[in-house]
Image: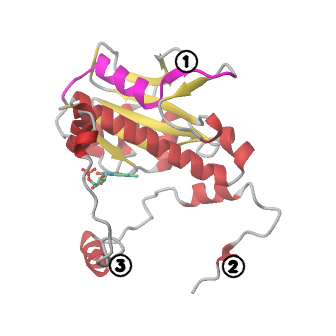
């Protein structure tokens, strides 16, 4: 049994551990994953979930009728899907996804903008970018999503679509996307307060955003593949992120369904 204290970093180095973790968990060509067969064998050996059911277990109702039809449908229809054939997305759909994924909801007492996802300390460390390849009403190119203005600001210099798509393990799907949303984090916005633990919060918050994107996409009939299968350094370099102060952490490959 591992003694967790043995993996504790000696006092004095806290606050920097997240950087080591982030750097050491970047996907590189050298990082070999087990084969599909090996994964299947391992999964057979593992329980799908804890199985300690006893007669006393409380059976639960689905609660299905408590949900609004639209939310239930969006949840039930959501599935990961990206096409290899490009189908143009309309700008309103993209705007809707961005607004309700991480756009502003209302002004807070401190003058900043509350969003549609929870955020530890309401610090909102994420910055959202869009690589648009086929969005009707939007020039193809790369953009930063300006939360406050709810607008797309063209990046200068622009991102090479070929280079950015080459960062994805599923390069064909990325290249055929109408748009790719890249969720990046500016970690300092959170770790200054929470230290290393704040790094976790950034990833968790990106998960909230990814889920909002997926549910909204499902609701409005857009195909969405939430993806972490990318070579971090290539994606970061193509967007001009240094990979530590700011780094890409999540992506959504979008296309009209
Ligand atoms: C953090 C995260 C990263 C993922 N990265 C990828 C990815 O790179 N490529 C991919 O095809 N699917 C990716 N997925 C999607 C999963 O493969 C998918 O959610 C899973 O197979 C369940 O299928 P469903 O989403 O259709 O219910 C990712 C999902 C999550 C939560």
The mark that comes first in sequence, 1 or 2, is 2
**Disc on res. 148:** 1
Position of residue 87 relative to residue 189, above or below, is above
Position of residue 99 relative to residue 17, above or below, is above
**Disc on res. 52:** 3
| Dot 1: element | loop
Q: Position of residue 206 (x, y in %)?
A: 48, 42
| Dot 2: element | helix
**Which-is-in-front pick, marks 3 and 2?**
3
The mark that comes first in sequence, 1 or 3, is 3
The mark that comes first in sequence, 3 or 2, is 2
Q: Are marks 3 and 2 in contact (CB under 8 Å)?
A: no
What is the residue that sits farthest to the right in this orientation?
12
Q: Position of residue 115 (x, y in %)?
A: 52, 28
* Picture quarter with the N terminus: bottom right
Front residue of this view, candidates 7 and 119:
119
User: Within 10 Å of the Cα at label 2, are there few (<14), some (14-19), or many (20+) other Cα atoms?
Assistant: few
Give the residue pinned by disc 2.
Answer: 6
Q: Which residues are magenta?
A: 87-109
**Residue in the image at 48% along x and 25% along y:** 103
């Amino acid at each position: 049994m591992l003694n967790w204290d043995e993996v504790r970093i000696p006092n004095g180095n806290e606050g920097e551990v997240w950087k080591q973790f982030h750097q050491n968990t970047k996907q590189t060509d050298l990082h070999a994953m087990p084969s599909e067969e090996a994964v299947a064998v391992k999964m057979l050996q593992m329980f799908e979930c804890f199985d300690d059911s006893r007669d006393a277990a409380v059976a639960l109702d689905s609660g299905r009728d408590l949900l609004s039809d639209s939310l239930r449908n969006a949840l039930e229809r959501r599935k990961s899907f990206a096409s290899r054939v490009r189908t143009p997305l309309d700008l309103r759909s993209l705007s809707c996804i961005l607004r309700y994924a991480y756009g502003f909801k209302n002004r807070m007492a401190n003058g900043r903008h509350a969003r549609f996802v929870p955020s530890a300390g309401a610090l909102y460390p994420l910055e959202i970018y869009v690589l648009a390849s086929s969005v009707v009403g939007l020039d193809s190119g790369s953009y930063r999503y300006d939360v406050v203005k709810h607008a797309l600001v063209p990046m200068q210099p622009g991102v090479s679509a070929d280079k950015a798509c080459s960062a994805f393990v599923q390069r064909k799907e990325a290249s055929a996307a109408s748009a790719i949303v890249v969720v990046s984090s500016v970690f300092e916005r959170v770790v200054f307060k929470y230290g290393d633990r704040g790094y976790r919060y950034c990833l968790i918050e990106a998960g909230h955003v990814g889920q909002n994107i997926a549910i909204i996409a499902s609701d409005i009939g857009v195909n969405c593949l939430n993806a972490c299968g990318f070579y971090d350094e290539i994606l970061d370099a193509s967007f001009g992120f240094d990979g530590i102060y700011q780094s890409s952490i999540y992506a959504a490959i979008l296309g009209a369904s």
